[in-house]
Amino acid sequence: MKINYLSLFYLTVCCLFFSTQCIAQSSPPKKRDNIDIKLWGGAELDLKLNKSWSISLMTQARMKSMGTEFDRFLLEFETAYNPRFHSFVKPMKLKVGVRYFGTVDEDDGYENNLRLHADLSYKLKLKRFHVAYRFRYQAKNELKQKESIYKNYWTQDFRNLIRIGYNFKKWKLDPEIWVELFFHDELGALDGFTKYRVGFKTSYDFDKNNAITLKYFLEMETKYYNPKQTHVIALSYQHKFKLKKGK
């Protein structure tokens, strides 16, 4: 029997989002002001140094609640290593990065934050499908906290992400769905499994060096009372280039 992979993929998407909505409906009643919609826009430069090493620089602006003002600006540097000494570890990738982001608070003040992260990911290809898992550890600290009693305290997150995608023949907008779970550790705050994201994304390659990515995801808090629900639409541009070898 011939399998219709397109129908199978979109059936998986529908089941995933239906399950998410069932979880949301089973939660206690939420206030309408706890539902938010945000827009993100960004650009990324990727430089491949050799077969194993690459570095990237990313910047992003995030719009506040579908308004006309941006309330968060990011700048991130990341380096990635892909071990290639054995076929088993070729699908593996290790990353470390640092992110600075400034946030406009409710009093129109400006907060400066620094975040460090380390990733371990593994990707498998099954014919035209691909399945990938990523574990991320990240630590964040607000800079120059003069009035805080917890000065120089780093909050921690442990993130687990699973992605499933399909490569269609003669089709550039290959889809991908993903789920990510967040486990938080912070002094004086709610710890443990605090939120999750369910998303969908696709990319369009203009050529081998330039592409745009469109992404949508739903972020849900897991706390019992008044959990926040956020819908995010993100558009980003990527430019890739290789380090030229000297003659």
Image (cartoon, grey):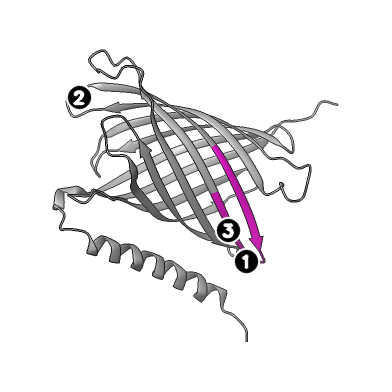
| Disc on the earlier residue, 3 or 1 | 3
| Percent coordinates x, y for residue 102 in the rendering | 34, 25
| Disc on the earlier residue, 2 or 1 | 2
Q: Which residues are magenta?
A: 119-133
Instruction: Identify the residue shown where x is 51% and y is 47%.
Output: 212
Q: Secondary structure at mark 3?
A: strand
- Return the residue nearer the eye: 42 or 12: 12
Instruction: Identify the residue shown where x is 64% and y is 65%.
Output: 128
| Percent coordinates x, y for residue 31 in the rendering | 13, 52
Of all residues, the one furthest to the right in this rendering is: 247
Label 1 Cα neighbours within 10 Å, binned few <14 / some 14-19 / many ≥20: few
Residue that badge 3 annotates: 131
The CA span between labels 2 and 3 is 43 Å
Residue that badge 1 annotates: 170
Q: Quadrant of residue 56?
A: top right
Residue that badge 2 annotates: 108
Drawn side of residue 232 relative to residue 53, left or right: left
| Percent coordinates x, y for residue 5 in the rendering | 56, 74
Q: Is residue 190 in the magenta section?
A: no
Quadrant in which the C terminus appears: top right
